Image (cartoon, rainbow, N blue to C red):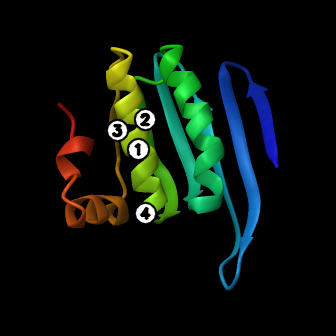
Amino acid sequence: MIDKRSHGRTQRLVVGRNRYSGTGRQDASFEILEGGRARVLGSLHFSTVSALLAAGLDAIDAGQAAVIDLAGVAASDSSALALLIEWLSVAKATGKELRYENIPTQLSQLARLSEVEELLAPA
């Protein structure tokens, strides 16, 4: 389920209410904030990242996501790393600036193991 809500100047895309065996309910959301900032909240897993991909691409293209805050990411897997790299790739291809803030330790460690941590580091 995708639920688009607008609260004041914040636009929010909620993805999911997905169930994974043994781990309970997991949701993810992409929120556009003010000043070219956005944030991702929730669990980034294979079944939530595809919808977030589109939301992030739209925000990047519109100049609404030059900075994406990841402090609200509670859990992730390798698909989250692929999502972040794809957003960077598209931003670069379209001449847009993009950087990440507050990358969770789990994602940083995965990026280091995958030898792509320099891609996520601020320029």
Q: How far is disc 4 from disc 2 in space, using C-alphas?
A: 15 Å
Which is more foreground, mark 4 or mark 3? 4
Residue 14 percent coordinates (x, y): 72, 44
Q: How far is disc 3 from disc 1 in space, using C-alphas?
A: 9 Å
- Residue for badge 1: 84
Amino acid type of the residue that numbered disc 3 sits on in the rendered structure: Tyr
Marked residue nearer the N-terminal end (4 or 2): 4
Residue 88 in view, yes or no: yes
Amino acid type of the residue that numbered disc 2 sits on in the rendered structure: Trp
Give me the residue at 42% from left, 51% from top.
82
Residue 111 percent coordinates (x, y): 27, 58
Q: Residues within 10 Å of mark 2 (few under 14, many from 20)?
A: some
Asked which secondary structure carries label 1, the reply is helix
Amino acid type of the residue that numbered disc 4 sits on in the rendered structure: Ser
The circle drawn on residue 78 is: 4
Marked residue nearer the N-terminal end (2 or 3): 2
Give me the residue at 34% from left, 40% from top.
101
> Do the numbered discs 2 and 1 sit on residues whose CB atoms are within 8 Å?
yes
Q: Is residue 40 above or below residue 117?
A: above
Marked residue nearer the N-terminal end (4 or 3): 4
- Residue for badge 2: 87
> Do the numbered discs 1 and 4 sit on residues whose CB atoms are within 8 Å?
no
Q: Is residue 9 above or below residue 117?
A: above
Q: How far is disc 1 from disc 4 in space, using C-alphas?
A: 10 Å
Asked which secondary structure carries label 3, the reply is strand
Q: Residue furthest bottom?
A: 22
Give me the residue at 41% from left, 44% from top.
84
- Residue for badge 3: 100
> Do the numbered discs 3 and 1 sit on residues whose CB atoms are within 8 Å?
yes
Position of the C terminus, as image quadrant, is top left
Which is more foreground, mark 2 or mark 3? 2
> Do the numbered discs 4 and 2 sit on residues whose CB atoms are within 8 Å?
no
